[in-house]
Amino acid sequence: MAELLRSLRDSQLVARFQRRCGLFPAPEASGEEHVVKNYFYYYLFRFSAALGQEVFYITFLPFTHWNIDPNLSRRLVTIWVLVMYIGQVAKDILKWPRPSSPPVVRLEKKIIAEYGMPSTHAMAATAISFTLFISTMDRYQYPFILGLTMAVAFSTLVCLSRLYTGMHTVLDVLGGVLITAILIALTYPAWTLIDCLDSASPLFPVCVIVVPFLLCYNYPVSDYYSPTRADTTTIVAAGAGVTLGFWINHFFQLVSKPTPSLPVIQSIPPLTTDMLVLGLAKFMVGIMLILLVRQLVQKLSLQVLFSWFKVVTRNKEARRRLEIEVPYKFVTYTSVGICATTFVPMLHRFLGLL
């Protein structure tokens, strides 16, 4: 067993996968970092890697909320936040290094400073795809095999992309998938209960803010700075903002409460031109408002924190300090979550897009 685990952590195994897919280290004299001999795999796995990154989740999750089902979107966000927090914390506790280069070719530079085990890309992709599949089985009528195939395909593509880009070992990816499967199995019986946590108590938002903030502020200390803490704070804060947004909607009766048991829709409505145009209009309006709120709140929160701690403005190193990084990230993305779930739908209603 120990020998098997060592082989799955071997960087040579990742390097062999890259070679089979046509990705090779460039000769030292060429001045290039790598040579691509199969562009089909190159673009397939680069695109698949993007499906596990922030740009996908900040577009897919809001789109789901505004155009498909807000309650489904909230469940996806809840599971995503849980899985990502556990995955990020596990990285900084285990402190397993990423595959060594050479022999592996690394195609991503931004997250090299993070540890490797488990792969949070694999965790997020598995969590989103299978939560979406499980949650829609009793809501929409579609072939079970089709839904399962799409969930497996999405998760598999993202997992393989982490090997192709040289960012994870096979064991990192398998570990991420296994942890996510366990978390889904453990939390599934409570999904319906979690969906109904919009308590009318005024103390509910205090818990929603204080507990996630403390989890972020007491994040495991790393041996050196990496973006893991900042990324974790962003994710947890967005989840707190979404939960708080739902509480605001229900507490102030901005929306009607969902029925405990959602009715089964006989078939997925056909995509028409009008639906597509309306969906894109709602998405563009929502994203523009979110970006505006994000920019304003981030700038204001940084100015307040820099003034409070007497730090020179635009000091990039100061942004990495615990007492500055966590509060400004948390305030910014909590505001984004509230905006997405409360103010964007209100704007949609004002503009006649609902």
Image (cartoon, helix red, strand yellow):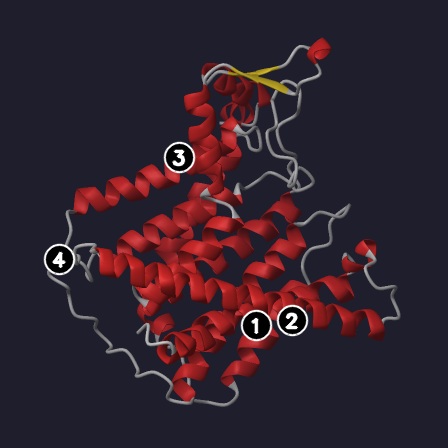
- Quarter location, residue 265: bottom left
Going from the N terminus, do you reach mark 4 or mark 2 first?
Answer: 4
Q: Position of residue 151 (x, y in %)?
A: 31, 44
Q: Report helix, strand or loop for mark 1.
A: helix
**Which residue is the site of mark 2?**
297
- Quarter location, residue 274: bottom left
Going from the N terminus, do you reach mark 3 or mark 4 first?
Answer: 3
Q: Is disc 4 in contact with disc 2, using a CB cutoff of under 8 Å?
A: no
Q: In the image, what residue type sits under mark 2?
A: Val
**Which residue is the site of mark 1?**
335
Which of the two discs, 4 and 2, sits closer to the camera? Answer: 2
Q: In the image, what residue type sits under mark 1?
A: Ser
- Residue visible at 77% across and 66% down in the picture: 323
Horizontal side of 322 relative to 216 (left or right) equals right
> Residue 202, relative to residue 106: is it above or below?
below
Q: Position of residue 322 (x, y in %)?
A: 76, 62
Q: In the image, what residue type sits under mark 4?
A: Ser
**Which residue is the site of mark 3?**
157
> Residue 11, relative to residue 313: is it above or below?
above
Q: Report helix, strand or loop for mark 2.
A: helix
Going from the N terminus, do you reach mark 1 or mark 3 first?
Answer: 3
Q: Position of residue 175 (x, y in %)?
A: 48, 39
Which of the two discs, 3 and 4, sits closer to the camera? Answer: 4
Which of 83/299 is in front?
299
- Residue visible at 75% across and 48% down in the picture: 225
Horizontal side of 225 relative to 185 (left or right) equals right
**Which residue is the site of mark 4?**
267
Q: Is disc 3 in contact with disc 4, using a CB cutoff of under 8 Å?
A: no
Q: Report helix, strand or loop for mark 4.
A: loop
